[in-house]
Amino acid sequence: LRRSGPVSLSPFFAPLLSKLVLLRQQPPSMTKFCLGATCGLGYYLLQPSPVQAKDNFDKSIKVPRHKVIRRSAIFWKNVAPIIIHYKFAKMWMNRVKSYDKEERDVVYERLHEMYAPEARNVICELRGLFVKIGQVISSRPDFVPSLYIEHFQELQDSVPPYPSDQIKSVISHSLQQNFGMKFDDVFEEFSDEPLGSASIGQVHEAKLTSDFEKKCYGYIGGPKVAVKVMHLDAEDLFRNDFKTFKWLCRFALPGWTPILTELERQIMTEFDYRNEASSLNKVRENMMSSPYKNLVRVPQPVECYSTRNVLIMEKFKGNPLIAVAENNLTEILKGDRQLAKTMMEKRRQAIFCDDTSKETEQETIKLLQEAISHHSLFTRASILWRMKSLISTQRKYTELLLDVHGYQIFVNGVFNGDPHPGNILVLQNGQLGLIDYGQCYKLRNDDRLALAKIVKEVGSIEIDDEKVSSYMREMGFIFRNYKDNVMKETAILFFDSDEKRRELGFPSPQELLMYLNELDPLEYVPDAAGNYKLYTHLPKILGNSFISSLTSIFN
C-alpha cells in the first residue's frame, strides 16, 4: 500500500486506504480486515428504509430511492474509515503495553484533530438528521471530545435555508387545505430572508393582517409574529437517516444505542408543529404562574391556526444570549472583538476540557493585561471594573436559567429538551426569552421523585451504593446483572460528572460507558433519565455562550 498509494484505487476505497497508510507497523491482516469490513458495510447498508410519509402538503414528501442510497454511500464512504482507524488505534495501544495514559491521550488527540473537521464536512454535505445529531452533540460535552464539539458548534447557524418561494408555497397550501384561507388573508407582510434555518424547518418574520388577528381567539402577542415552516422532505430523510445511525451505534458507539432510541422517539414528534404549539402554551402558562413570571417569557403561539407544517407564534424583540455577551465584552474592550473572541475561546476550551485550574485562569488574565497595557491606568481600571459588572450580570442569568429549568423539571414536569444557547434570548427589557419547544419533555410524578432521589444521593459526600442502585431500579434502569457498584458509577455519569473516566484514563465519557457496559450491560435507559441528562451539563452548555467563561475569569 505504501508503494502504490491510493491514487490508482477506486474512489470508494481511496479515503480508507489513504488513512490506513498513516498507521505505523500495521500488519497485512489488518489491511485485509479493513477492506473486508468496508465492503461488507457498503453491501449491507446501502439500502433505504421503508418510506412511511405521503406526498401532500400536510405531510412530508417521499425522498427518491436513489437519493437515499446515495446519502448512505456518502456517509459510509467517509465514516467507515474513521471508525476503523479509531478501533485499530485502540487495539494497537492495548496490544503494545508501553503506551501510558499520556501517550494514549496524545494519540487520541491527533485522531480528533484529523477527523473532527471531516465529520463536520460530512454533516454539512448531507444535512437532514446528520445536522440535528451534530447540533445535539455540540451540546453534549459529557459524551464527545471537545474538538468535535468545537467543530460541531458551527452547525448551530450554518444550515442553508430553502428558497422563499417554496416556503410560501408550503404555507399557502397548508392554510388553504386546513382553513380555506389564502396567504394574503393571513399575512400583511412576510420577510423573504429567514430569521434562522435548521435541519427540520426555518423561521421567517411576518406581520398579521388586522382581520386575521381578530380571529385568533385568546392571542395577545401582537401583529409581529415568527412563522416556523417545515421542510417537506425532512421527515422522510430523518426516517432513513436514523437507520444509518443505528448501524453506526452497533459498530462504533454501543453505549449510544439507548440514547439514540430516545432521541429518535423525541425528534420524530417534531414533525407536527401542533405538538410544539401545545407545548409552548403549557410551558408559558407554567411560567406565568411561577416565581419567575417577571424574569422569563415564553412566546405565545397562535394555536388555533397552527398546522402540521406551519406554526405561527409571537415574535420577541431581542438577541441571542451568545451575541449579547460577546457584544458587551467587545464594547468593554474598546471594540476589540478579536480579543473578546480569543479570551472566550480559551475559557470555553478550558471549561469543556474541565481544565479550570488557577494556571489556566492566570493565562487568560495575562492575555487581557497584555492586550490593554497600552491604555492609560484610568482606562485599564475602567475596563476591569466594567468587566466585573458584566460578570455579575451574566452570573445572574446563569443562576436564573438553572433555577428556571430546575423548576420546570422538578415542579412542572414539562421542560425544553434542547436547551442550547441559541434558544435563549435577552429581551429589550432585560428579561430572558425561552424559545423553540420542538422537543418538549414531560415527566410523571413518580419519575420526578425517583430522579430527585438519585440526584440527591449522587451529590452526597459519601454515596451509598445500595441506595443509588435501589433508586436506579425505581426509575426504570435495566441492567443485566444489577451490580451495585456499576449502577452507582452509571448514575454518576448520567446525573453528575464524568470524573471517573479521567481517573481510569479513558479519552471520552463514551469510552467509560462502554467500559461500564462490559462490567454489567445497561439494557434500558428510561425516557426520564435520557431527557434529564442534558441538564446535568447545562453549565457547560452555557459556557458556549461565554457565561461560565466570564464568571470564572475573575472569581
Image: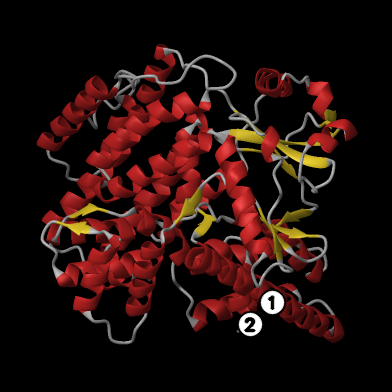
Disc 1 residue crowd, few under 14, some 14–19, many 20+, Cα 10 Å: many
| x and y, in percent, of residue 75 in the image | 38, 29
Q: Residue at x 67, y 70 (%)?
A: 292
Element type where label 2 sits in the image: loop
Q: Which of pointers 1 and 2 lies earlier in the amino acid sequence?
A: 1
Is 417 placed left or right of 338 in the picture?
Answer: left
User: Circle 2 sits on which residue?
Assistant: 554
Element type where label 1 sits in the image: helix
Quarter holding residue 473 = bottom left
Instruction: Tell me, yes or no, if residue 94 can be seen here.
Output: yes
Q: How many labels does the image show?
A: 2
Q: From this viewpoint, which residue is outermost toward the right?
A: 210
Is 340 placed left or right of 249 in the picture?
Answer: right
Name the residue nearer the viewer: 529 or 277.
Answer: 277
Residue type pointed to by label 1 = Ile
User: Circle 1 sits on which residue?
Assistant: 391
